[in-house]
Image (spheres, rainbow, N blue to C red):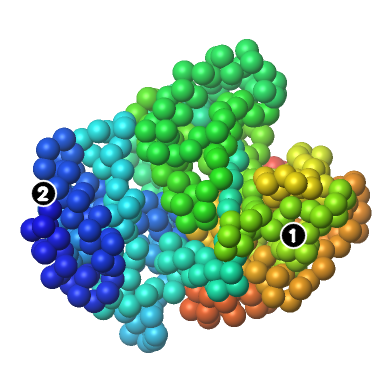
């Protein structure tokens, strides 16, 4: 191990301060463990702007060079929309600032985090190693997802607080009935697969349905646990072929990494088994139900004490009131980060156990924010039900931290809780992606806390997606106009 540590500590990353002394020791220990030869390849990856893993696969024997010097990757990987089109100007020679470092489709530097190394249980000769992207000169990228969350966590820590989160994640698993590998089915993006149900659904939490789905549930649970993910429950959701996994609480960065691993594992494992898993919010299949991603949140002080425990029944603690008020005050501009797809806004419908307006209530599943708090209960928390499961967890969690922190700093006061969440005068959530983009652009929270480079980046990225959406003639338009005009 000593020779590995000496090699790593003399490398570019260590010498430039991009790899801490503790990370160097962890990396050296990891290299020593890999001498047994069981791991043959390592997928050196990073979570991109859409929460998708990208990277290169190297042989295990080459891993030492990654800890010494990092890995060069095309910077355009951070400049693509969900169709994989590069939507930022890289050839005009006019860009400035951080974007200038990406001109000409040049490289960026991927810096590994040895704590994220995981052997893949469905491919045990291979492993994951997560990285953080930097400019090729080793400077921070202001819109790299993982570092963005770190900045938000650091700002909260400056106030003496730490956020703990718990995850409830809904998704669909379908049988794949046809592979989409014909030449005509390629494209940007390619055509989606043809699928069929594993279960007819609409028997929420029915044990007979669970029994039919148990082989798939068990497969995914075992792989998740083998990755070290703290699975709490596996459940049959309301819709056909709809699943829900919940996870024990953890800190924000840990659970953001966990969500990336979980989503990727589910899709990769299901694909190997002839199935198609999707975290798309509202799949366009008959009789489908929307999927949500509920984020449980509690705030702790430096001693670990839960600051959301109420002083008396029916009352909010001071911190809980400010936090809820912050989540509500910035909900519209945060939607670009909590609900980043065109499709996600089709979930905001009344009487569907999903929010359609900006409000909170005590243990009310129709409200955007659900308060689950009892005097003396150390698990007192709020649950934000606004997000879609396709959201980038680093951006999603950052939006919650910065919104809640704004409420704390300004000592915002939460409005009265609602009892009828679908019949009141609360402001509606943005009804579409373009409305969310406009709310993000006119808001100041993220420009002030994460900087103009981040705000401008997100605006360009999502506007490109919206413009592509508008360019497509939909089935509704064909049915509505083709016959009568």
Count neighbours of disc 2 (C-alpha within 10 A) and say few if under 14, some if 14 to 19, many if 20 or more.
some
Looking at the rendered structure, the secondary structure element under dot 2 is: helix
What residue lies at 74% left-to-right and 59% top-to-bottom? 320
Q: Position of residue 35 (x, y in %)?
A: 11, 43
Q: Is residue 104 above or below residue 360?
A: below
Q: CA distance from mark 2 to mark 1?
A: 50 Å
Count neighbours of disc 1 (C-alpha within 10 A) and say few if under 14, some if 14 to 19, many if 20 or more.
many
What residue lies at 21% left-to-right and 49% top-to-bottom? 30
Do we see residue 5 in this rendering?
Answer: yes
Do we see residue 458 in this rendering?
Answer: no
Looking at the image, is mark 2 or mark 1 earlier in the sequence?
A: 2
Q: Nearer the viewer, residue 469 or 417?
A: 417
Q: Position of residue 183 (x, y in %)?
A: 32, 40
Q: Position of residue 329 (x, y in %)?
A: 75, 67
Q: Position of residue 335 (x, y in %)?
A: 65, 60
Q: Residue furthest front?
A: 303
Looking at the rendered structure, the secondary structure element under dot 1 is: helix
What residue lies at 49% left-to-right and 49% top-to-bottom? 255
What residue lies at 37% left-to-right and 75% top-to-bottom? 140
Q: Which residue is mark 1?
A: 320
Mark drawn on residue 61: 2
Q: Nearer the viewer, residue 66 or 19?
A: 19
> Is label 2 or label 1 in front?
1
Q: Is residue 118 left or right of residue 412?
A: left
Q: Is residue 440 left or right of residue 465?
A: right
């Amino acid at each position: 191990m000593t020779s590995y540590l000496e090699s790593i500590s003399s490398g570019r990353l260590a010498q430039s301060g991009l790899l801490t002394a503790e990370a160097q020791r962890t990396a050296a220990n990891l290299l020593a463990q890999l001498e047994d030869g069981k791991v043959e390849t390592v997928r050196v990856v990073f979570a991109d702007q859409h929460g998708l893993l990208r990277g290169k696969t190297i042989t295990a024997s080459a891993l030492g060079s990654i800890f010494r010097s990092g890995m060069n990757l095309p910077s355009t990987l951070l400049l693509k929309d969900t169709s994989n089109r590069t939507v930022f100007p890289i050839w005009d020679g006019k860009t400035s600032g951080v974007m200038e470092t990406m001109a000409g489709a040049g490289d960026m530097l991927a810096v590994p985090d040895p704590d994220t190394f995981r052997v893949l249980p469905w491919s045990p000769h291979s492993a994951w190693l997560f990285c953080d992207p930097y400019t090729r000169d080793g400077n921070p990228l202001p819109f790299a997802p993982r570092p963005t969350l770190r900045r938000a966590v650091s700002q909260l820590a400056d106030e003496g607080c730490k956020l703990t989160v718990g995850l409830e994640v809904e998704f669909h698993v379908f049988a794949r009935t046809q592979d989409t590998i014909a030449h005509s089915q390629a494209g940007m993006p390619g055509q989606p697969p043809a699928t069929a149900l594993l279960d007819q659904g609409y028997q929420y939490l029915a044990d007979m349905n669970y029994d039919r789905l148990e082989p798939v549930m068990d497969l995914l649970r075992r792989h998740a646990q083998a990755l070290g993910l703290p699975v709490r429950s596996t459940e049959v959701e309301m819709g056909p072929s709809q699943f829900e996994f919940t996870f024990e609480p953890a800190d924000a960065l840990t659970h953001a990494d966990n969500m990336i691993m979980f989503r990727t594992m589910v899709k990769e494992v299901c694909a190997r088994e002839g199935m198609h898993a999707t975290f798309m919010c509202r799949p366009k299949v008959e009789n489908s139900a929307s999927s949500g991603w509920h984020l449980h949140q509690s705030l702790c002080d430096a001693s670990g004490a839960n600051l959301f425990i109420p002083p008396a029944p029916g009352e909010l603690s001071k911190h809980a009131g400010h936090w809820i008020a912050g989540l509500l005050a910035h909900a519209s501009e945060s939607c670009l980060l909590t609900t980043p797809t065109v499709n996600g806004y089709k979930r905001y419908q009344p009487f569907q156990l999903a929010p359609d307006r900006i409000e909170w209530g005590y243990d009310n599943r129709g409200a955007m924010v659900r308060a689950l708090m009892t005097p003396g209960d150390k698990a007192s928390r709020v649950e934000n039900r606004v997000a879609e499961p396709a959201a980038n967890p680093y951006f999603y969690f950052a939006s919650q931290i910065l919104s809640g922190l704004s409420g704390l700093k300004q000592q915002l006061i939460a409005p009265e809780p609602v009892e009828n969440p679908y019949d009141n005068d609360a402001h509606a959530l943005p009804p579409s992606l373009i409305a969310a983009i406009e709310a993000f652009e006119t808001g100041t929270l993220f420009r002030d806390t994460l900087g103009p480079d981040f705000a401008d980046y997100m605006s360009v990225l999502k506007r490109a997606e919206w413009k592509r959406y508008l360019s497509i003639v939909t089935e509704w338009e064909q049915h509505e106009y083709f016959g009568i005009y």
